[in-house]
Image (cartoon, rainbow, N blue to C red):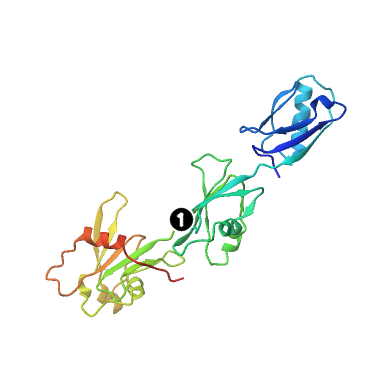
Amino acid sequence: MKLVPGSMVDIHVFEETDLDGTYRLDGHGNISLPLAGSIHIESLTLREAEAAISAKLVAEEILRAPHVVVNIDEYGAQNIVVLGEVTSPGRYPALASRRLVDVLAMAGGRTPVAGNEIVIHRSDQPAETTESVHYGRDTDSRTSADLEIHPGDTVLVKKAGIVYVLGSVNRPGGYVMQEAGDLNIAQAIALAFGTAPEAANGSIRVIRKQSDGSIVELPVLYDKVNKGEATALSLQPEDIVFVPSSKWKSTFINTKGVMASAAGASIYVFR
């Protein structure tokens, strides 16, 4: 266990009672020892802190061969921050490292729309440096579950990809993508319990938002896909599959209206 700001340590220097005392680490991880001044002992074990204090006493020519004993009087807990798709995001005190699965449990577990990607920022790394781990139901996820999360780290559970199936289908709504993140047009419509009797299968479109913010409409050869004459279009997260009604006299789609409907759609999870 390593010392953190806020910890209180009891220091005893053999045959030097003037240096004995209880000291609390300040916000920078330092203690102020009489005569020796400021000593940085953050992130050190008790034995390492003893060596650092001894070295300081020698460097300041206070003692030639000090014998220092450091004991913990009060440990200042740090927090592990858990964000994203968990039931209770927030800060959770941690005195020592915890397994990823235990950290997620502290936050109430993942939500139904949580994805398989978890992003971790280590407290001793620059803000832009993160690591991503796959956390799912496959056999390789056991290693991810046992990954150590240290006090001061931040854990972000990302949202799963969702595809919206709207219009003339039997159950319109948003559908969480499969474990591997793969979903094609035929599978998406099947999740929505198929097209309704009034559906214009020949006019089905996929509305997709591009990385530059523009919107494109992709035609879907749904009848040919069902007959095995065409390959089913692979969908991307946030795609909208719109099945128009055959009652429409025009193939024009009110894209903005469809996207607004997606924002209020019910979300269904099949895992």
Pick whichever, 59 or 86, lies toward us.
86
On screen, 39 above or below 110? above
The residue positioned 53% from the left and 67% from the top of the image is 137
Within the image, what quadrant is residue 25 found in?
Answer: top right
Pick whichever, 5 or 127, lies toward us.
5
Relative to 216, 153 lies left or right: right
On screen, 42 above or below 142? above
Q: Which residue is farthest top? A: 61
Pick whichever, 27 or 157, lies toward us.
27
The residue carrying mark 1 is 158
Residue 178 percent across, percent down from the top left: 43, 67
Within-10-Å neighbours for mark 1: few <14, some 14–19, many 20+: some
- Give the structural element (helix, strand or loop) at label 1: strand
Within the image, what quadrant is residue 169 found in?
Answer: bottom left
Relative to 118, 193 lies left or right: left
Relative to 135, 77 lies left or right: right
Within the image, what quadrant is residue 258 found in?
Answer: bottom left
Residue 52 percent across, percent down from the top left: 74, 31
On screen, 34 above or below 260? above
Residue 192 percent across, percent down from the top left: 33, 73
Q: Amino acid at mark 1?
A: Lys
Relative to 142, 187 lies left or right: left
Q: Which residue is farthest right? A: 15
Q: Which residue is farthest left? A: 249
Residue 147 percent across, percent down from the top left: 61, 55
The residue positioned 53% from the left and 39% from the top of the image is 126
The residue positioned 34% from the left and 71% from the top of the image is 188
Which quarter of the image is occupied by the N terminus?
Answer: top right
Q: How many numbered dots are placed on residues in this image?
A: 1
